Image (cartoon, coloured by chain):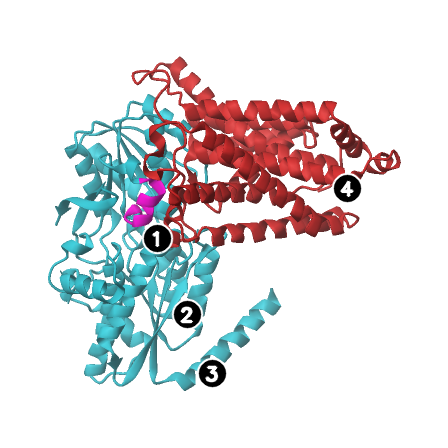
Amino acid sequence: MLQFARLTTVLGSLAIAATAFAADSIKIISSLPRTGSANAQTTSMVNGIKMAIAEVGTINGATILYEDWDDASAQRGNWDPAVEAANADKAIADKSILAYIGTYNSGASKISMPKLNAAGLVMVSPANTAPNLTKPGFGEPNEPAVYRPSGKISYFRVVPTDDVQGAVAADFAKETGAKKVFVLNDREVYGKGVAGVFEKHAKEIGLEVVGTDGIDAKASNYKSVVTKIKQAGADLVYFGGTTQTNAGQLAKDIVTVGLKARLIVPDGCYEQAFIEAAGAKALEGRAFITFGGKEPKALTGKGKDFYENYKKAYGGEPEGYAVYGYESAKVVLTAMQNIAKAGGKLTRESVLAEVAKTKNFSGALGTWSFDANGDTTNRTMSVNTVKDGKFETVKVVE
Amino acid sequence: MTPTEVFMQQVIYGLSNGMIIALVALGYTMVYGIVELINFAHGDLFMLGGFFALTIVGALGAAGVLDIAHMGDHSNWLLLFGLVIAAGVFCGGLNVAIDRVVYKPMRKSPKLTQLVAAIGVSFIIVNLGLFWGGAPMEVFGGGNAAAASKDFPEILEGSNLLGEDSNIVLRLEDLAIFIVTIPLMIALTIFVKKTRLGRGMRATAQNPVAAKLMGIDTDRVISATFLIGGFLGGAASVMWSLYNNTISFQMGFRAGMDAFTAAVLGGIGSMPGAMLGGVLIGLIRAMSDQYIETRWTNVVVFGVLILILVFRPSGLLGLKQREKV
């Protein structure tokens, strides 16, 4: 262990020495799950980031380097705590890196947030929605302070959080006429968080919660669990989870077991991979997916430009989170441009301070600001369903 | 649903899931019985069987023989049996090949070496599955996301056999599991009890050196064991795909773990033990999901395993105490 510590110190100083030569370039990196079924979604997000960089070009004559890092491992087929921790360490060691875009999964951010915070490296997440990462009162008593060892806020996100999303889902459940709901989660930070918000809000608006449980994301099927839900008489199932934590199998088993209930899932399932895993047949007319924003083709203003440019550049429809990848890179790069314009020096410190100041940012998601917690003031939510194998928006809540 | 109906339903699901686990467990227990190797690659071999079956289905769909989009509208028993045999032969053949290339040269090495080799083979197969998932076929999502779960088309018609109004759901796929697994288990038992090769297996399991002295070609017996174990794994993978309609390159790990637990629970090395263990684990899982909470299911399964091993260290039907790992 001692030897290992010594080795990392040596490597760290080597990295510092190496970066001295790269003064004329600015580096930003992203840490997203590139291995696994989220790949289509994250490829789309990386494309968005690349578009933002291409639009900005250079800052003060310095080229912007970008590296696309993977925080998943083949063994898990999903984000991996060890890989995310290694990514954070690697980013901290490379002094030319001025911004860290990530992560996709809220659980992964829990690991990198305190590390990056201590190093003063700004982190902008395009997709984390768990409220306890930034807001007190949603998770453990020591959250979110535990993620901010330096005492400063260095984590920002461009996507509305689950305290909004879970509530929108519960309101929508009531609108569909549901009376008894069964709440499941995948026992991960994100899934458990959003399911908790849903449950709380559902009770407030008078829905009866007939049961809650945490499923095993690696189980082969959920027929027994669904049977229990059927016995409980639920007419709606809420699952806080993602495609990677087996939402597709759950949707299938609801059909096989003959449970006549609707299914609502959060934005972790707002990707084509969810439809592929569940099969469109299991979803059409009975599954609803909430998402913290509008579907790409419904974006307006700069968002519409993004959508058109994306299709031109990559020849396909962007996934739901592509625009958030774009927006998170854009907000960082705009901060850097502002520093450069004011004649300041680009350092981790100055970039962090400038990003934190973001007010009335006019971007692809509309005009929004970062609030005192580092969260976006944007609160647009949509409820989507599946039709002909594609997502279709049924409702937008501003 | 009345409590009795709920119980019946859980018995159906528990038994069907358990029978699949039992088939996989047989592969573990047979190989262990003969060469005392815990073949950790078996679960992953099972996974490849699923990919092989989906590839066949995809190829038949592309050739116009199958209409994949409407496969659930009617039952295709011929396809099911064909896939069981094809995937069985594929996995059996592969298992024999792995034994020849990897395990056989190590037969005289310490058991731990072989065990680590098996874990290595398991990693290789998992990555092979990951690679296979990127096959540029319609059924693999066009090969866009190699690691994504794949939708396995329905082979049998999906309506409730007890009538659409019945609270208990019994579908053809539930029955199909029994229709396929029970004859396979009976055939296996007869084979081991009555045939010459089966007797050779039992003799080799008892004492390989003595068996060899008695003129039994132990190498042939070992190959046959890997072949049969692999065949059952391949057959199980088709039943699994039929039952869950989803396959993924990671499914081998959980299936392997369940099956290995079943084999240990029943007494590793004992074939009836593996069958009993598989069915028991399926039932325990279903009952725990219903009457406790699904978040505790793994705790319950392994709790039961530990309890049984405390009182019967060699498992429910295990006869003698064997050392090793």
Residue B208 coordinates in the image, percent (x, y): 82, 37
Q: Which residues are magenta?
A: A269-279
Q: Can residue A216 be spotted in the picture?
A: yes
Q: To which residue does mark 2 refer?
A: A91
Mark nearest the camera among 4 and 2 is 4
Q: Amino acid at mark 1?
A: Ser
Reply above or below: B261 against A10.
Answer: above
Residue A17 disc label? 3
Above/below status of B134 relative to B49? below
**Mark nearer the N terminus (3 vs 1):** 3
Label 3 packing within 10 angstroms: few (<14), some (14-19), many (20+): few
In the image: residue A241, left or right of residue B127: left
| Residue A359 image-quadrant placement | bottom left
Name the secondary structure under disc 4.
helix
Q: What amino acid type is highlighted by mark number 2?
A: Ala
Q: Chain of mark 4?
A: B
Which chain does the red colour mark?
B
Callout 1: 10 Å neighbours few (<14), some, many (20+)?
many
Q: Which mark is residue B219?
A: 4
Which colour is chain A painted?
cyan
For the residues labelled 3 and 1, say whether their Cβ atoms are less than 8 Å apart: no
- The residue labelled by disc 1 is A106
